[in-house]
Image (spheres, rainbow, N blue to C red):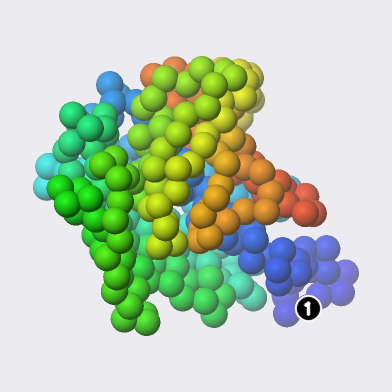
Amino acid sequence: MKRTKGVPRGLRISKDRLKSSCLFLCLVFLLVFSRSSSAFTGPEKLVFDLTWTGIKAGTPTLETVNDKGRTKIISTARSAKWVSLFYTVDDRVESLLRDEQAVSLIGLPENYRIKLREGRHRRDKELIFDHANSRVTFIDHISNERKIFKIGGTTFDPLTSFYYVRGLKLEVGKSVYVDVFDSKKLWNVEVQVLRREKVKTKLGEFDTVVIKPLMKSEGIFNRKGDVYIWLTDDKKRVPVKLVSKLAVGSITANLTGGTF
């Protein structure tokens, strides 16, 4: 088989298609929902295999850790070796929560930092939340931009927003909503609860609830195709499968290990 720069012809992907794949590598874990408040008591780590049309493209992880008495969520996404030969992805997103259970079962975000490396593209942005004064400070550490925006009383960053949603009661046929600040805008994101479905994975068979977030924002939530997430139909609501439809094929993330 003829090869180009060490990559088999059958594995070559167009630049735009690969970029969509790599963006989803990060997106997957900005959409993952945490366990409900009754189970949100200790460290958790989820490990996924990410595939595009059956070909492994990366290994994203999502974990919650105790940081001096507060909860920190850490999302990482790294491209597989064959992808890194011509398009390296090395993303890390962190969100530090403060205890505000009177407002949200998991608390509210205090600080959100997203550092992305995708090919030649770099992104290093931060959100500092001031919920008492209903405002958020946006910082772009690369361009040195700094702005303050107004937010609502219960506003989340892209990473913690769905931790909040997963703690809600999910009923098939009914949507839930969450306010998310992303891309310098405040979005009221609808999450549709579609159906219950049994799913087989490497870790076994699970009864799940299938949800579909309706993306609106211009940043990492900007998707041309639909996104579907399979959550275990229990108190933990562990994401066992995620699928993003593309113009050609789809990208799938399957839970393969971790501690939960």
Q: Nearer the viewer, residue 114 or 77?
A: 114
Instruction: Give me the residue at 11% from left, 47% from top.
Output: 68
Q: Amino acid at mark 1?
A: Thr
Q: Label 1's element?
A: strand
- Is 117 placed left or right of 204 in the picture? left
**Which quadrant: the C terminus?**
top left
Q: Position of residue 81 (x, y in %)?
A: 59, 66
Instruction: Give me the residue at 37% from left, 71% from top.
Output: 124
- How many numbered marks are there? 1
Task: State whether residue 63 is above or below residue 171.
Answer: below
Instruction: Give me the residue at 29% from left, 56% from top.
Output: 150
The image quarter in which residue 46 lies: top left
- Is 113 placed left or right of 12 in the picture? left
The residue singled out by tag 1 in the image is: 4
Can residue 111 be seen at all in this image of the molecule?
Answer: no
The image quarter in which residue 14 lies: bottom right
For label 1, the crowd category at 10 Å Cα-Cα, with few meaning under 14, some 14 to 19 and many 20 or more, is few
Q: Position of residue 119 (x, y in %)?
A: 56, 75
Q: Nearer the viewer, residue 40 or 165?
A: 165
**Which quadrant: the N terminus?**
bottom right
Q: Position of residue 37 (x, y in %)?
A: 28, 26
Q: Nearer the viewer, residue 113 or 161?
A: 161
- Is 248 placed left or right of 233 in the picture? right
Instruction: Give me the residue at 44% from left, 62% from top.
Output: 183
